[in-house]
Structure formats: structure tokens, C-alpha cells
Image (cartoon, rainbow, N blue to C red):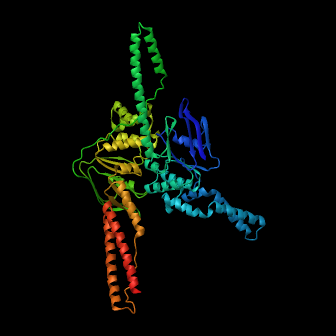
Amino acid sequence: MIDIQVKDLKKFFVIGENLLDGISFEIQEGECVAILGRNGCGKTTLFNILTGQMDYDEGTVTVNPHKRLGLISQIPRFPAGYTVEDVLRSAFAELLAIRKRMEALEQTMSGGASQEQLREYDTLVNRFQAGGGYDMDVEVDKISNGLGITPAQRGQLFDSLSGGEKTRVNLARLLLEKTDILLLDEPTNHLDLRSVEWLEGYINAFKGTVLTISHDRYFLDRVADRIIEIVEGKAEFYSGNYSFYIDEKQARFDLQMKQYEQEQAKLKQLGYTVERMKGWGINNRTLYRRAMSIQHRMERIKKTEKPKQQRTMKATFGEKDFSGDVVFKMKNVEKGFGDRMLFSNVDLTVEGGERIALLGDNGTGKSTFIRCLLGDEDCKGKIQFGPTVKWGYLPQIIHFAHPERTLYDTMLYEKNCSPQTARDRLGAFLFQGEDVFKTVGTLSGGEQSRLRLCMLMDEKINLLILDEPTNHLDIASREWIEAAIEEFEGVLLFVSHDRYFIEKFAERIWLLEDGSIRDFKCGYSKYRSIIEHEAAAKPTVVTAPKPKKEKPKGGTKEQDKLIRRLERDIEKQEQLIAELDAAIDAAAADYQELTRLLEEKEQAEETLLEMMENWENAQQ
């Protein structure tokens, strides 16, 4: 069954320039389809058209009328005084109205009920039960816990939340509404790793249809069945996830380029032949007519369009030479607000060339940690930088001192460079033509990140600190940043929830959790394996009861000796397991050693169980 059908869709904002230029596609029931394309190509416009929030100029758009459709691109307004809990419960507006009517009927019928009232009440109970009314509390708790919405946050006023927190609550509300077709516009932008993984599991188990806009490549690999890319107003189709899309896109480019080059070589050869035959045919009409015939054939050849490489930004970080071994040291660093301790007893040393990812759930204090490191936030303990260290910092929330200035003026004033240098640097970051005269305050989040990077890359630094560098950026811009970072040979410290980015660059992981930082001297894949092994090991811990020491009545001397020997062996085995537990904690960052110790512990616990069974048999 087709849930969404779009045929020859056209939409323009400037006459003669179509944003969407004849797009056609179908989405089948139960599919998860990703919409890709550069920022500004029309992805969100397409979503607004599908939901009826925006009109279109030509074509047809059909959404299954028997399905409920939900969109997460915009945050709806709620009445003043609404808490997060009220917003979440608004997903059950119909069920809450039914319950309210049921309660009113119960009050009325307390003094006696008519047959009509009983019939109405019975109908309402059936509707309430069929709609999942008795499971509302369970569903709200499940979705809230999965997306990291804490019980304390559920009591806060919705208007007091940050933009990211509002987006997360609105996503939870949408999931609670039990819509049949989900339209998700950048659903992972404000989620931490734990919440993103939960959302992936939810989507994979979801029986309805999902259409998502996302630049999270890891997320697309996990959930997308196929991909639709919008390029210059047209739709291109790929029948697989992101990894398939990358390989297939390159294969199509290579094939088209090969066909184009072969055609150009053939046309060049024919053109050379035509010119020679024309020269020979000055006194030979037959040769001249043959030359004209070849020329007409060349004009009729269907020519392959030369494939276009997307424009890329070409820039690298300016680097300052670093002398020495230690970049910075942290000793007994701690930071808290009131009774809440974000982190304490932090002892870390960073040496030249390291690439470190700082991970942790939202609200654990990662950005605060970065600000403490840079001296923008007071903290206890000692932080010492090497004498030749110069850092550059890209914050998560970017502010410009003069948002009324144009990009061009911002470069002139803040970087103190010549007009030509300002234009050249902006051009390297794809700010070209009239774009350089936009005011900074009108730029999108991604464009502001790009401008700040443009200014940052000119500085001579040897420590680069990035807080969520890929937020608001499309895939092409993310790949450009990655290419620039690959060329950077200094120390890299970054906060990110982009697993593709983390996988590519992290050679050391700092996990901020439960008020402390765990240091994993390994990449992301190995770190994930360690965390998964630890999680898997927790439920398998055997808590063997201590054997009773009293001597059984009526036993023989041989039995008594056997029991005492078994008790001694059990105590030794329990001591061995305790030592293995300590060794496992010490080897948390060594994947191979950790695996060996976990296997050894499992065998030791099985031996302990056998000893306990033997002891019980001897007692009997």
C-alpha cells in the first residue's frame, strides 16, 4: 500500500527559479526513507508541503487519508503554564477527554444510573481501553526514559526549556501520539548518544512509515531502507542505507564521467575528420557532402552531460609549532553547582598529537568541563598548559559581538585583513558573490558555524577544541570539516554525538558519567565493545549464599571432613572471584585483557556453583 505519493511536484519562491523542479516518488507502507541534500535544497519545504503547512505550484501530493501523520520539524505553541508533563500528556488529548467524561458519569451515577447512562459509560470504557488509556502512564515513562527526559524535567515549565530540550520533548510527544506516518526533520540534532541509540531501536521496531531528514550518517546506516537525494530540484534514488548510497553515488559518477569522456573523444575524432574532409572537398563535392553528413550525425548524437563535482571548501587550520611533551595537565579538578557535583577528582594528562573525544549524556557537564579547561568557568584543582600551547575553540552556541555587521565587514574588523584577503577567505568557505554582504545575524546555525571556522582556521594554533562541531551542518559540510581536521597535526579535543565523526577521529575517549571521568585509551569501536561487555557482565554476576557453618547432626567423620574441605574451597573460590572483579575494574581500557578476565570470571562462577551443589549434597 502506498502511504505517500508525490508526482511532478514544483515549488518556487522566486519566479523562474524552482526550488523543487518536478520531483516524483512513492513511499510504501512500513518503509523508512531518508531525504538527503545540501542545506537549502528544499528538504524542509517538502515536509511542509506533505503536512499541508505550505502550498505548491504544480504537481500532485497524496497522503493516505486513513493514516495519521506527524511532523517534528516545528515546535508547536502550548498554553502558558504548561509543564513538560502537560505537553507529553497532550498526545492523549482524545483519551483524556474520554476519561473526563467517564469521571463525570461516575459522579452522576453515584446516586443511581439510567440505562442510557450505563450504555454510554460502557461505550466510553471500551473506547478508553481500546485506545490504550490504561497504559498511558507506562507509555509516557517508557518514551521519556528512552529520550532522557528526567522526572525532574517533567515538572519544569515547557517555556523554560532550551531549544534543544523543547525539540526532545516534542519528539517524545509525537512518538506518544501513535501516528502511522512519522516525518522526522533532524531528529538526532539535540539527542545524546544513549537517546539516539534508543530512537534507532524505536524506529526499527515501528510498524508504520518513516520519512526522515538527517545528516547523521551513522543513524542513516542503522534505520534507512532507501534514500532520496534532492539535487538541483530533482530527485535521485538509492535503494539502500547511507553506506550503499555513498558507494552507488561514486559508481554513478564514475560511469557518467567515463561515458562523457568516451563521447568527447569520439566527437573530437569525428570533428577532426570533418575538417580534413572539408579541406579535401574544396574541389571534390562528394567528399564535401560526406563531411557535412558526418557533421549532421555529430549534431544528432545524444550527448552525456558532464557530471558535476559538488563545490568543496578548501582550507586548513593554521598550525603553531609545539615544543615539549605535555600539552596540559589536570590535577584534582572538580566543578559543581550548589549540591550538584558535575565532576570531581579529575586527573588527566594530554600529550602532543592526541585526538580525544569527550562523551557523556546531555546535562552531565561536558561543555562546562571545556569552559573550565579554557578558564571561562571557575573550578577547583589545578590546570596547567605547556608553555608553547595556543588553542582555538569552536563553541556549541556561537555568538558574534556585532551581528549587525556583514560577513565581509566582520572579517575586515575582527581579522584585520585586506579587502581581497577577506573575500578570498570567505570564498574558500563557500561565501561567494552577494552572500558576503549578508548580515551575520541573519545566518543559519550552520552558516554561523562555517563563518566562525573561517575565522578560526586563520589562527596559528596547536590545540583545537570543538564543542559539537557538526551540529546544523549538512553532510557535505561535515565531510569538509573532517578533511580539514585530518590535515591538522596538533592536539584535538572534541565533544560530539556524531558517531561517524567520533569513529573517524577519536583515539582516546573520556567518558563523563556519574560525576567522574573514565579514561579509555582506545578508539570508539573498542570503547563500545568494553561498555557492552561491562553491561553484559552485570546480570551474570552470581551472588552465592554463604554456606552455613553449623555442623550437621548425625554425620560421620568422613562427611564432616568433606564438608569442612568444601567450605574452605568455597571461601577460596569466592576470594578468587573478588580478585577477578578488581582486575576487571583495573583493565577497563584494555579490551583484550578485559575479555580474558570476563571469561575467566565466568568459569570461576560456574566452578563456585558446582562447589555449592556438592556442599549441599554433603549436608544432606
Which of 78 and 471 lies nearest the eye of the viewer? 471
Quarter of the picture containing the C terminus is bottom left
Q: Residue furthest bottom?
A: 554
Of all residues shown, which one is farthest toward the front?
Answer: 286
5 sits to left or right of 338: right
Residue 112 found in image quarter: bottom right
Q: Judge by depth and name the residue closer to the eye, 266 or 214.
A: 266
Rendered location of residue 168, percent (x, y) = 50, 53
Q: Nearer the viewer, residue 590 or 603?
A: 603
Residue 474, visible in the rendered structure: no
User: What is the total number of numbered labels drawn onto the structure image?
Assistant: 0
Q: Quadrant of residue 254?
A: top left
List x then y, in percent, for residue 213.
50, 45
Question: Residue 25 location in percent, x, y?
Answer: 56, 40
Horizontally, is 120 left or right of 580 in the view? Answer: right
Rendered view: 29 above or below 292: below
Would residue 345 be seen by someone viewing this image from the given angle? yes
Outermost residue to the left: 324
User: In the rendered view, would you say 280 is above or below 470?
Assistant: above
Q: Quadrant of residue 308?
A: top left
Residue at the spot x=39%, y=11% of the render?
279
Residue at the spot x=31%, y=57% of the render? 521
Q: Can you give x and y, in whole percent of width and height, for residue 555 in the image?
A: 38, 91
